[in-house]
Amino acid sequence: MQPFNYLLFALVISTLTYFMGSHSVRAQTLTITIGEYPPYSGKSLIEQGLVPQIIRKAFAEKDIQVKFVFMPWARSFKESEKINYDASAFWFCTTKRQQDYFCSTALYEETAVFFYNKSNPVPPWRTLQELDKYRIGATRGYSYTQEFWQLAKTGSLDINVMTRDEQNLSMLIKGRIDLFPMGLLPARYLLDQKYPQEKHQLSYHTTPLMTGTLHLLFPKSKEDSVALLKVFNDGMQKIMHSGEYQAILSKSQNR
């Protein structure tokens, strides 16, 4: 082979190797939409929170890296259908969502209860209809229950929707709403972080608004979703058996 041809051949091979290698790296990095829900998720939290840690560990079993993009919850769900995102974390697997998404193995279970201000106590409740005289806060993009949103739609419940949980807790402390449903761990975390002096003003009813499991959602519209779902579920099974999953969750229990 002539020297010039040899150099040209080497240059072509080197260039192809570079681009093939770069493609391989890109193919092994997933981009997942997510919202703020500390301590489960948060852009400024250590390792971005408990849920991102779990998801990364599960995918790492197959040497897949994960990048999380934080945005408001409603937008996070909507954006997940776009081509530059692979999945969305983390959601209740409702019947409606199952029409368009594959739901992963459960990430964790959560119970939402109604918080209230002790200066304006709300009696224990049995049905949502009993709460028709109270101002209830809600966070945009959250599932709660189908009945909850249906009663809001018909005007049977007075629901005030805000963008963030922090805003609702602030309104509850100030007496601008009477009730706000939230998971116990995230509520306690936010109160400790944002309202340490005022948190003693609030209490909650033990009757749950809802109890359910949270999942990673893969859009059915994307051809890789079935394969990614299997990879993730297999990874979850492995970290559950190894004890890594429980080790991550135990961080929240030690708070």
Image: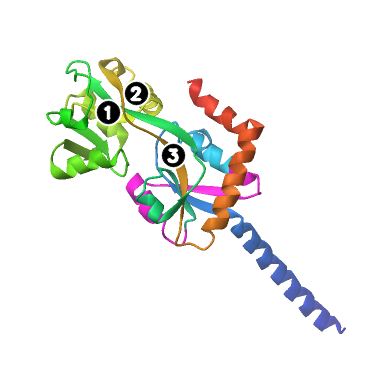
- Figure check: 234 above or below 46: below
| Residue 163 visible to an observer of this rendering | no
Q: Is residue 254 above or below residue 3?
A: above
Q: Which residue is mark 2?
A: 191
> In the rendering, at what x and y percent does residue 150 appear?
21, 43
Q: Please give the label number shown on residue 169.
A: 1
Residue type at mark 3: give it.
Leu
Part of the protein shown in magenta: 58-84
Whether label 1 touches label 2, CB < 8 Å: yes
Which amino acid type is marked by label 1?
Leu
Mark 3: secondary structure: strand
Q: Is residue 236 left or right of residue 138?
A: right
The magenta stretch spans residue 79: yes
**Foreground of the two, 219 or 6:** 219
Query: Between disc 3 and disc 1, whose residue precedes?
Result: 1
Question: What SS does tag 2 mark?
Answer: helix
Which amino acid lies under the numbered mark 2 shown in the image of this protein?
Leu
Which residue does the numbered mark 3 point to in the structure image?
A: 214
Q: Which mark is residue 144?
A: none
Along the horizontal axis of the image, is 66 left or right of 83? right
Place residue 19 in its image quadrant: bottom right
Q: Position of residue 105 (x, y in %)?
A: 52, 42
Between disc 2 and disc 3, the foreground one is: 3
